[in-house]
Image: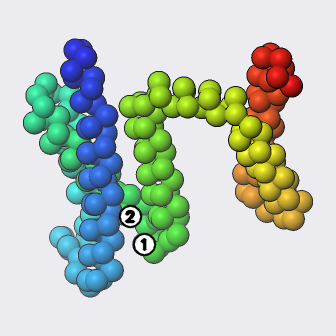
Amino acid sequence: MSSEKSELRPNLSVLALVSFVLAFLVARSFTTLYPNIVLISGGFHIHHFWFGLAMMAIGGWIGISYRDERADRLAAILFGAGGGLIGDEVGLLLTFGDYRSGITYTLVITFIILATLLILLNRYSRVIRLEFTRFLSSNASLYIGVFMAAVSIAFIAETNDILVIAASGLLTVMAVLIIAVYIYRRLRSGRL
């Protein structure tokens, strides 16, 4: 793969992500504004996640079958839009009937955050490593680490909710690691 092609990949990721978000928003808006318009064929309600599956399959097939910039962009758009249509009905699929389930928003937002992070890490990993290294050497990392640990421990002490305790515990571990790296780097440089 040439370096020119590898530079196009992050753009395709962004294109797929934007297509995902737009398809999700259009599908959710349409079903909210027109809840009584449904496609029924042979007595079956055809949900739009089926169209999403077809779009993802076609986009995937185009993506692996052709080596052309236009085909790659078309594949990214179809794949992302298909994922958005599926994402819109994930609550319906997981709850067996509750289209308005809050799990849809939780999963879609989580997916968008993770995809965005992966795109940014892929595209800017060298710059991110450099900035993170600089951050760990600065006093700001110590202050942020102490703040994160204090707030996380306060949340752990105030709740019995296992998810809050798990998330706060993870943040506490991250905070302790940030503080430890700060102290280690300071000791190593002789500035502590």
Residue kind at label 1, given as amino acid type: Tyr
Residue 97 found in image quarter: bottom left
The residue sitting at 77% across, 45% down in the picture is: 143
Q: Quadrant of the N terminus?
A: top left
The residue sitting at 42% across, 31% down in the picture is: 124
The residue sitting at 11% across, 28% down in the picture is: 68
Classify 32 as above or below 150: below
User: What secondary structure is found at the residue carrying circle 1?
Assistant: loop
Mark 1 neighbour class, 10 Å CA radius: few under 14, some 14 to 19, many 20 or more: some
Residue kind at label 2, given as amino acid type: Glu
The CA distance from mark 2 to mark 1 is 6 Å
Percent of width and height locating residue 43: 23, 74
The residue sitting at 27% across, 60% down in the picture is: 23
Classify 158 as above or below 122: below
Percent of width and height locating residue 37: 22, 81
Q: How many marks?
A: 2
User: What secondary structure is found at the residue carrying circle 2?
Assistant: loop
State whether residue 112 appears in this view: yes
Give the label on residue 89, or none. Answer: 2
Give the label on residue 185, or none. Answer: none
Percent of width and height locating residue 191: 82, 22
62 sits left or right of 3 in the view: left
| Pointers 2 and 1 in contact (C-beta within 8 Å) | yes
Residue furthest to the right in view is 157
Residue 134 found in image quarter: top right
Q: Nearer the viewer, residue 108 or 43?
A: 108
Q: Quadrant of the C terminus?
A: top right
Q: Earlier in the sequence, mark 2 or mark 1?
A: 2
Percent of width and height locating residue 6: 27, 23
Q: Nearer the viewer, residue 131 or 125?
A: 131
Residue labelled with disc 1: 99
